[in-house]
Amino acid sequence: MFSARRILVYVAVGLVLAVAAVGCASGAAPTQGSPTPTKVSGSPTPLPTSTVAAIPGSGLIKGPYEGEAKQLTGAGATFPAPLYTKWFSEYEKLTGVKVNYQSIGSGGGIKSITDRTVDFGASDAPMTDEQLKAAKGEILHVPTALGAVVPTYNLQGLPKPIKFTPETLCGIFMGKIKKWSDPALKADNPELNLPDKDIIVVHRSDGSGTTYIWTDYLSTVCPEWKEKVGKGTSVNWPVGIGAKGNEGVSGEVRQNPNSIGYVELIYALQNKLPVGWVKNKAGKFIEPTLESVTAAAAGVAARIPPDLRVSIVDAEGENSYPVSGFTYLLVYKEQTDKAKAVALTRMMWWAIHDAQQYNAGLGYAPLPAEIIKLAEAKVESITVDGQKAFPGK
């Protein structure tokens, strides 16, 4: 997937971009309102120990902790499911705490945490102001990784990736561009022999943070999409067939010649599906990579609000991949069970520090330094019986 050398380059670039952005982020004004705002085969390549140790706060979680719960439950986004599978396996080895995570989609994760049927939810879509008001207490958003949502397709014999503009992606998913041989697609891909075949559009059928990121992007770059369809974890699709989960969409694309869908990058790589390049705000066609996703995060660093609910689609920057997003853990600030609160905050602290070593090997960009600092504050603000829940080790 990624060579060790390439991963180190991506991480180094990400850290440089993050450091450059810290000054802007520290003075950012709060954003008003809401942003409405399967296991991977092979062994992921971890970051070197020296790189992980360089992240302040790493190494605090060294083993089991007396009095903490030995089991946690979570549910939500399919976007980070391959990453969380690896994380929670490693965390159980380290602490003996078993984290049961159900990959049911971001909509399910938001509902589960709202109803308090899980210890944490997971979502790629920030909860809206209305959703937060409906919860049984204050919910915190703690980012865990950055990822790319990519157009993936099933066309044989193409020597290069297909290039997509905002206009062609909007046209395809609005149902106005119906054939691969459409003049607009051919104009952007003169070197490709695109077939005169009908385009089969595949989209998510369940509530999905991947859908939120994808429709947030289309709403940002396409006025017609914003007016007629909008953004959300679920929308009324103008065209296409639905499938459940990133794995469902990638499976449908793999099985249907001439199809196109949108998935988190790792699912396209797992299924050996090609990935399109997308034209960004600076006018460049960008390959979705760890470097270009981290560049997108740096491009919006100046406007990250205190609650961390932010969109990073169509970000500024020459090398920013335009369909990028954070994925979050959702937790109640005030916990009711001390043993679980201790286990939960320790797991989350490990996730935003030591666990970042596994992100790059699985196709997710590690958190930039300034985001880790903001996430730390969220974890440390969690309380139980009026006392700080995180024991600090």
Image (tube, grey):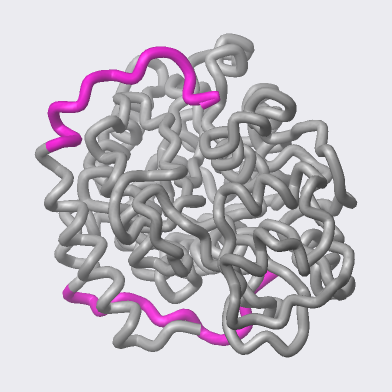
Residue at point 73%, 26% (across, down)? 228
Residue 207 lies, in percent from the top left, at 74, 38
- Residue 120 in view here: no
**Residue 233, picture quadrant:** top right
- Vertical order, 370 against 185 (above or below): above
Residue at point 44%, 27% (across, down)? 140
Residue 172 lies, in percent from the top left, at 74, 52
- Vertical order, 204 against 291 (above or below): above
**Residue 94, picture quadrant:** bottom left
Relative to 225, is 57 on the left or the right? left
Relative to 160, is 46 on the left or the right? left
Q: Which is more toward the observer, 361 or 58?
A: 361
Residue 327 lies, in percent from the top left, at 50, 46
**Residue 131, picture quadrant:** top right
- Residue 182 in view here: yes
User: In this picture, which residue range is highlighted in magenta?
Assistant: 24-50
Examine the residues drawn in magenta and state their main secondary structure: loop
Q: Which is more toward the observer, 224 or 30?
A: 224
Residue at point 66%, 30% (across, down)? 224
- Verify whether residue 119 appears in magenta: no
